[in-house]
Image: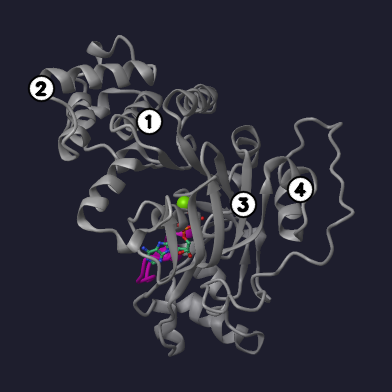
Amino acid sequence: DSLVEIQNVSKLFDLSQSAIDQLLGREAQPVRAVQDVDLTINKGDIMGIAGESGCGKTTLGKLLVKLYEPTSGRILFDGRDMSELLREDQQEFRQRVQMIFQDPFESLNPRMTVFQSVVEPLKINDIGDGYQDRREQVIQVLNDVGLSPAEAYLNEFPKELSGGERQRVAIARALVVNPDFIVCDEPVSMLDVSIRAGVLNLMKELQDEYGLTYVFISHDLSLIRYMCDRTAIMYLGNIVEQGPTDDVVNDPKHPYTEALFDAVPEIEPGAQRRRANVTGEVPNPRNPPSGCKFHPRCANIIPPEDWSGSQDAFRRGFNFKRRVQTGDLEVEDIAEGHADQRSAVDAVLETGLSLELPEEHQADGERMGTVDVDSIDIP
Ligand code: ADP
Ligand code: MG
């Protein structure tokens, strides 16, 4: 029984001309963040979206909660086209569909107390019968997310809480309106490893208790394996493979999926995967599969004949410095002179230089940092 149907959805972002475009005298190109995606999400499922940073996971999540409109294609929620909802249906939709972000501060206003943050959606959606009733609902949901006694939290500001408590408040804020569907975008990746399991188990309990359907976005495949009934693997804005999580993990059909799982240290050494069905090579971003030419990691990459020129442009345009003693290169320095929203890492990729980030910098939002200069390969 399907709750959400994504039909041939693409999302393009128009970008201003970047510094590197200017240096090379090129037009700005749109970024195709999500491309021709088809996906069905069944009621009561946890649907995983996995893939490396920049592949379009967050954009897809935001399309699902109508924070973005698709450039083309459509998304049906409970059989209704989300972009054609009538006014009263929009209000119902806003209540039934919620999103939890990696950073709790995307949901929480730092100037609002826990009570104010959690009661606000009740007010906006006109739920509850006066102050006392709403206060009881807030206390109930805070207890449900493990913040108890709830009364002790009501007047705290987010700053005064631990990371885990803050994310629980963000979850409470999403839950208090009794939604059907929650998009969870890397909900534990900013939390200490030691408290992640607690929050994930809570999310599973809440799923049963509240009858929820989740989309669970993560670049961390062990979390996907732990949480998700079905999983879709994204690469360069496309879904390259989807199916029951066990099948995707144990019997990947696409070489990219295989490569993604191979990059994860094996926790149970005995658990060998079958590989018989995998054929072909992992698509190289410099030699992309057809149809993704708008992606910054594809189209904007300079053809090999221009590489020496682009190296110059790279050196002139982005004031990077080598710290010879440590062998490190400051990515933040590369970011200087980079005029649009794309990260320094994208800028490096654009120049045709390949770059491997140490694992600790690969998480979303952590792409700025120091990278090992040895891993930058100048063709
Ligand atoms: P992920 O969540 O998998 O890391 P995102 O959905 O955040 O990926 O980004 C996908 C691609 O779209 C990236 O190349 C990113 O730079 C680009 N992108 C995302 N949001 C915007 C935006 N608001 N404006 C321009 N480009 C964007
Ligand atoms: Mg993201």
Q: Looking at the image, tell me whether mark 4 or mark 2 is earlier in sequence order.
A: 2
Alpha-carbon neighbours of circle 2 within 10 Å: few (<14), some, or many (≥20)? few
Question: Residue 305, image x and y in percent?
Answer: 65, 89
- Circle 1 is placed at which residue position? 167
Alpha-carbon neighbours of circle 1 within 10 Å: few (<14), some, or many (≥20)? many
Question: Residue 279, image x and y in percent?
Answer: 84, 63
- Under circle 1, the secondary element is helix
- Circle 3 is placed at which residue position? 232
Magenta stretch: includes residue 339: yes
Please tell me which residue lies in front, 176 or 61: 176
Alpha-carbon neighbours of circle 4 within 10 Å: few (<14), some, or many (≥20)? few
Question: Residue 47, image x and y in percent?
Answer: 56, 44
Q: How is the image coloured?
A: one colour
Q: Quadrant where the C terminus lies?
A: bottom right
Is 279 displayed left or right of 55 in the figure?
right
Is 143 displayed left or right of 56 in the figure?
left
**In this picture, is 134 found above or below 296?**
above
List the single residue furthest toward the left.
Answer: 130
